Image (spheres, helix red, strand yellow):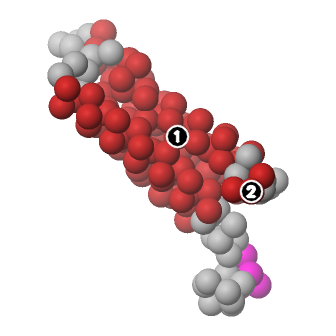
Amino acid sequence: MSPRNVMVLAVLVVDAVVLAVLELMFLPLRFDGYLLPYALGGIPVPVSALVAAVTTPWLVSVAGRLSSKLVVAAAPLIGWIVAIAAFGMFGPGGDLVLTADWRSMLLFACGALPSAIVLGRVLANTLNPAGG
């Protein structure tokens, strides 16, 4: 890998970690009148799961274009998972940031599953570049 690609990969991994932290911070968002207006009885709005479903697979696909090695393509996904685990379980000041309900599972599923599918596509293109 060229030095430029190594630098781009480092930026992608840092982006994945920053996005994971922001997604965790906005995971408890709800219509309760504090940040969002009070509506519908204060239901939770897991917008961060939607952000994870779009950004994490995109980071994996960009990393997959940098090199034919699977580890390179998986680096943003690995960084995202480690950041979710580390900051979710041992957050700022030792707080538990991951909520013990369906929103945490939704965040993990929306970030990891589409990224794993993109990673599988990168692996398939690496093993069979002709596509047939």
Q: Which mark is residue 93?
A: 2
Q: Can you identify the residue that label 1 sits on?
A: 80
Q: Residue reaching furthest front? A: 93
If you read the primary sequence from the N terminus, does the residue marked by circle 2 or circle 1 appear first? 1
Q: Residue furthest right?
A: 100
What amino acid is at disc 2?
Gly
Magenta-drawn segment? 39-43
Q: Position of residue 108 (x, y in %)?
A: 62, 44
**130 to the left or right of 120:** left
Q: Quadrant of the N terminus?
A: top left
Quadrant of the image occupied by residue 35: bottom right
Residue 52's place in the image compared with 35, above or below, is above
**Helix, strand or loop status at disc 1:** helix
Q: Position of residue 29 (x, y in %)?
A: 65, 71
Q: Identify whether 45 is placed above or below 50.
A: below
Question: With 65 as the anchor, is 114 left or right in this view?
Answer: right
User: In percent of the image, x 60 and y 65: which residue is there?
Assistant: 26
Mark 2–mark 1 distance (CA, rounded to whole Å): 20 Å
The reply to whether residue 131 is visible in this rendering is no
Left or right placement of residue 83 versus residue 60 in this view:
right
Q: Secondary structure at mark 2?
A: helix
Magenta run includes residue 77: no
Is 96 placed above or below 67 here? below
Q: Amino acid at mark 1?
A: Trp
Give percent across and percent down for residue 34.
Answer: 67, 86
Identify whether 96 is placed above or below 25: above
| Residue at x-position 41% and y-position 19% | 71
- Mark 1, Cα crowd under 10 Å, few <14 / some 14-19 / many 20+, is many
**Which mark, residue 57?**
none
User: What percent of the width, then of the height, locates residue 4?
Assistant: 18, 31
